Amino acid sequence: MRDFLDDRPVKLRRERSPVPASLRPFVLAVGLCLLAGMLVFLDRRGVITPARQMLQSLTAPVARQLTGLRDDLGAFLSAPRGTAALEARIAALERENGELRNQLLRLEQARVENNFLRQQLAIQQAHPWTLLGAEVTVRSPDGGRRMITIARGSREGLRPGMAVIGQLPGPPAALIGIVETAGPHTAHVLLITDVSSQVSGRVIHQDRAEVGLVQGQWQRGSRLQLGQITRDLELAPGDSVVTAGLTGALQLPFDLAAIPPNIPIGSVDQVRVLDQYQIAEVRPFVDPDQVGYVWVILSQDD
Amino acid sequence: MGDPQPRRLEEILAHEAARIAGLFLLACLQVTLLGLPSGFTLPLVPVLAICRTLLGVSAAFPDVGLGRALRWALYGGLALDVFAATPLGAHALALLLAVLVVAGLTRRLRVERPAVPLLAVLVGMLIYETVLALFLQPGGIEWRSYLLVVVLPSVVVALAPTLPLFLLLRRLLRGQL
C-alpha cells in the first residue's frame, strides 16, 4: 500500500484499537438502515414504486444487451472445438434433425387426416350416407380414360358401382365418379367426366324436376352433359343437377344401382335444344381432377 | 477526523455520483453477465461491499473507511433492488446489516490473513441471505431446505471469488486507505 501524497508505502494497522474512534460510523449505519427500511416500507405501500419502475425501464436496455452478450459468450464457450468434436456434433444434429422431420411429417399427416375427418363428419351430418375416406393414389396418366385409383378396396367394403364424392373449398360435396373395379386394397374410380360415364340425373328448376342422363364429356372438350330432358321443363343456367338414383335401370355394363339419389353433381351452364329434347352443359360442383381425397358412399340410411 | 481538509460540496457530490454510477454498473454486471449455469449468480456487489468494509475498518481512518463501506452497501443494494425488481431497499438493508456485523466482528482482526476475508464473506453472506429471505419470502420459509438449497450454495459461490476480489480491491483503493 502506498500513500497517495508522498508515495511512501502505507501499512495497514497491525494493532487494533479496542474502542471505536467515534460513534459516527455507527450513527451513519443506523441512519442508512433506517433509510433502507423506510424505502422498503414506501415501496410496499406503492409510494416510490413508479420511481423504481422508471429506473428499471431505463436500465432494461443495457441489461438486455449485457444478458445477450452473456448468452452469446456462453454459446461460444459451449460450442464444440476440434474436428472430431465438430463431426460428432454435426452427426448428433443430423440425427436430431431427422427425428424432428419425421415428427413434423407425422404431425402434418395427422393434421391433413384431421381435416379430412372433419369434412367427412360435416358431409355425414348433412346427408344420410355412410362414408369411407380414401386418398387418391394414382391419377389418369393420359386422356384416354378419366380414372383415378384410390387407396381403399374390397377389404374395406368397396364394391363396383359405389358412388365416390369429393369436396373442394366452397362448393358442396359432390359426385366425382363411380367405383369401377375394386381390388383388395385399391379401387379404380371412373370419373363422371369420362365420356364412358353415364349416370341418371335429376335437374331441378324452380319447384319442378326432370330426370335425364348425365354423361361425361371430357374427351369432347367440356365436362358434363345432361341429356334427354323434355322441352316441358325450361332449363336455365344455374339449375342444379343431382343424382336420380335410377342408374341401375339403365342396364349399363357395371352395377350402378349403388348410387344413392340426391348426390349433388353440378349446375347447368348452357342449354340448347335438339328436336324434342334439351341438352345442357353442366359444370360439376367438384372438379374430379382437383381432388386429392375422396369419400366412397358405402350405404345410405333410409 | 479523516481528511485533513474539508472537501467542497460539489466535490463530495461528484464523488458520490461516481460511486453510485460505479456500483450500478457492478450490479448490472452481476445480474447480467455473472449468472452461473446452476442458476446462482456470482454475488459481486455483496462480496465487494464486504471486502470494502474489511479494508475500511483496517485503514488509517477506520471511521471514514467504514462510512464509505456503508455507502457502498447502500448504493450497491439499491442498484440490485432496481435490477432485481425487489422492493427498493431490501437488498440495501440486507447488505447494510451484513456490512455492519462484519465491521463489528473484524475490528480486532488483521485483514492481511487470507482467512479473514473468507470468514467475513461467509458471515456476511449468511446475514445477507437470511435478511433477504425474510424480506422476499414473507409467506413463511421452511428454513432447513432454504438453508440447504439457497443459502449454503450462495455462500459457496460467494467465497470463490473473495480472495481475488479482496486483493484487487485493496490494490485499487490503496490511495484511499
Image (cartoon, helix red, strand yellow):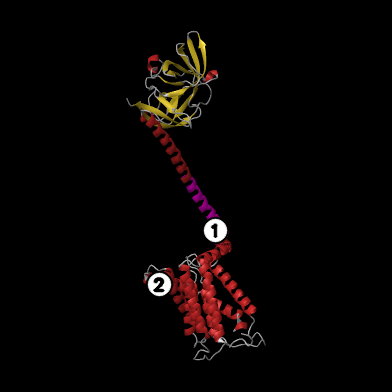
Q: Is residue B172 visible?
A: yes
Q: Amino acid at mark 2?
A: Leu
The reply to whether dot 2 and dot 1 touch (C-beta < 8 Å) is: no
Quarter of the figure with residue A124: top left
Membership of A232 in magenta stretch: no
Taking B144 as reference, is A53 left or right?
A: right
Residue A78 versus residue B21 in the image, above or below: above
Residue at the left extreme? A302
Density class for disc 2 (Cα within 10 Å; few <14, some 14-19, many ≥20) is some
| Residue that mark 1 sits on | A85
Observer-side mark, 2 or 1, equals 2
Residue B156: x and y in percent read: 46, 73
Residue B131 versus residue B64 in the image, above or below: above
Q: Amino acid at mark 1?
A: Ala
Residue A61: x and y in percent read: 58, 61
Boundaries of the magenta span: A74-102
Residue B98 versus residue A300 in the image, above or below: below
| Residue that mark 2 sits on | B147
Q: Secondary structure at mark 1?
A: helix
Residue at the right extreme? A6
Residue drawn at x 50%, y 47% as measured from the top left: A98
Membership of A77 in magenta stretch: yes
